[in-house]
Image (cartoon, grey):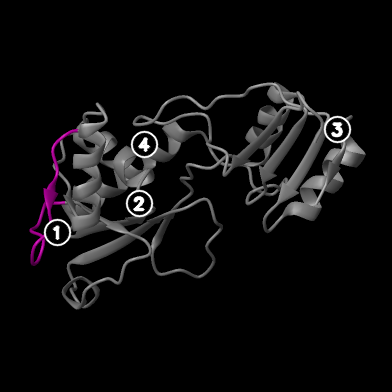
Amino acid sequence: FPDGHNLVYSGPVANGWSATAEKRECPPCDTLILDSKYGTPEFRFPAQKRVESRLLDWIAEQHKEGKIPVLLCANPGKAQDLIHLLGNNGHIPRVHRSIYLFKKAYLELGIELPSCRQLRGAPSPGEVVIWPDTTKIPANLLESKDVVFGTLTGEKIVDSKHEHFQWSCRADFKNLMKYIDAMKPTRTIVVGPNAMTLSDHLNTKTAYNAEA
């Protein structure tokens, strides 16, 4: 690249909102290297407030039926946003040790979160559990008739036994386009699972120059 060329590598682009993170930055650049995980028009996430409302209603319904909801999600990031949501709606969630340790790390960075408790043993009726979606689920949760699972992800889940909430910390297609528009790159290099689809869209439907 020539001297003075402004290159931005975005990595996974945030959705533009988070209760526990700073707002994303959109600095103008000459070249943008962009992650394309949700870079196809089929990925259009529902409004976050609607997802949160549905989740809270589902938790309340499960508690009325004597069930214990276990929420599977990414950690760090989504797990901490969940602690924030649940804590501000009357819950003190039980969490996996790694989530509990990240809460302490957040506090050291000046980000305060509502109370949560590390899960040791089995949860009790009326509680909510937050569990990392990449961590093995213990047998006492998997085999319990009182436990129900909810998965929080931007992916579209088909034929899952878990309740699915389309909650993603990453930008959907519309938000990716807003991000590109805000940065106005001369050249966009798209990487990731939907790189070809997104680069084709940019080249044929917009004035941007893109390559995968």
Residue where numbered disc 2 is placed: 75
Element marked by disc 2: loop
Q: Is residue 126 magenta?
A: yes
Name the residue nearer the viewer: 144 or 179: 179
Residue type (three-letter) at the residue carrying disc 3: Tyr
The image quadrant where one finds the N terminus is top right
Which quadrant of the structure image shows residue 174?
top right
Please report the bounds of the magenta region as a residue range.
Answer: 114-127
Q: The residue under label 2 is which amino acid type? A: Asn
SS for dot 3: loop
Closer to us: 79 or 43: 79
Q: CA distance from mark 3 to mark 2?
A: 34 Å
Q: Which residue is mark 3?
A: 208
- Seen in the picture, residue 15 relative to 75 is either above or below; the reply is above
68 or 76, nearer to the observer: 76
54 to the left or right of 137:
right
Residue drawn at the location 17% of the way across and 47% of the way down:
93
Q: Give yes or no for residue 160 being in the magenta stretch.
A: no
Q: Identify the residue at horizontal 20%, vertical 49% (top origin).
A: 101
Q: Amino acid at mark 4?
A: Ser
Q: Which residue is mark 1?
A: 66
Q: Please, what secondary structure does the residue beneath circle 4 have?
A: helix
Q: Is disc 2 surrounded by few (<14), some (14 to 19) or many (20+) residues within 10 Å?
A: some
Label 3 close to label 2 by CB (< 8 Å): no
Would you name the residue on which mark 4 appears?
53
Q: Position of residue 153 (x, y in %)?
A: 47, 53
- Disc 1 marks a residue whose amino acid type is Gly
How many numbered badges does the structure rendering display? 4
The image shows residue 209 at horizontal and vertical percentages of 87, 36
Query: Marks 3/4: CA distance?
Result: 37 Å
Give residue 196's position: percent from left, percent from top: 80, 54
Question: Predominant secondary structure in magenta?
Answer: loop
